[in-house]
Amino acid sequence: MRTPAAMIVGLVLCPCGLLLTLTGTLAPNWRQVSLIPHQPIDLIVEQGIWDICREQQSTHDRLCGQSDELGYFKQMPVWVAQGLMPASLVLTLLGLLVAALGVRCWQKEPWHLLAGIAGLVLLLSGLLSLVPVSWYTHELWGLPAPDRSTLAVGYSLVLIYLGSCLEISGGLALALSFHHCCKECRAPKQSPSPVLEVGPSSTIGSYHNPRDVLEDEREEQHWRSTLPCDSDL
């Protein structure tokens, strides 16, 4: 049996979503701060959920591990992202493992129930990463930043948005496997056809083979009267 198309779509989209989400989580570019007063005009400060980096575009000098002077890491959206993003990544890995066992490309029949459960797990992991990135985007302009500086969305948020959407789409594709399980449950069970057993324990008048039937018919024809019906009276 060929692997269903929905399962193939789920196994392609979810690993791509995991790669994008992992890159966006680790990259320190959730927010870009530029045009900082009393700083070089080409200086850009990149803020993530784990690190803060400074880069001067004219010389491409990049220095990470900057001190958090404004209390950026103490903000609630950053705390929530630090907790939910790793949880989402672990849940995605677990969902992919269960999906691989459910699809079972190396065997003839996939395990539709297990593939559907994996789809729900991957769907949950996509939602779990979508919540903190959405909250961070909503609070991006309210997080601590130097006065009169320019704020912009970093590429990490874009990567996580794309990765979350791919995980949700792949999870929904795998969750369609529940439809096959429902079809199997609603399918009528065929009862076995009755088998007439003939043996020594049969009742009187049963036949063991066709020759007995022919002999019995011959005896009936031999004793049947050949006279007209009126003569029987």
Image (cartoon, helix red, strand yellow):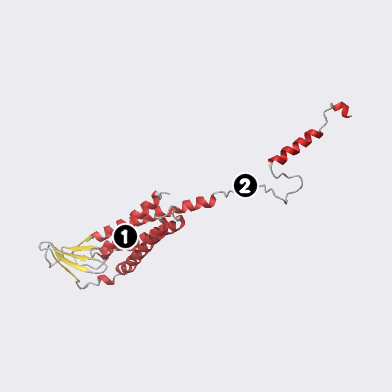
Q: Which of the 4 image quarters holds residue 79? A: bottom left
Q: Badge 2 is on which residue?
A: 193
x and y, in percent, of residue 183 in the image: 50, 50
Q: Nearer the viewer, residue 161 or 150?
A: 161
* Residue ranking furthest to the left: 59
Q: Badge 1 is on which residue?
A: 18
- At 37% from the left and 52% from the top, the residue drawn is 8
Residue 146 visible in the displayed image: no
x and y, in percent, of residue 22 in the image: 29, 62
Residue 84 visible in the displayed image: yes
Left or right: residue 139 compared with residue 43: right
Q: Nearer the viewer, residue 178 or 26?
A: 178
- At 51% from the left and 51% from the top, the residue drawn is 184
Q: Which of the 4 image quarters holds residue 229? A: top right
Q: Callout 1, which amino acid?
A: Leu
x and y, in percent, of residue 105 in the image: 39, 54
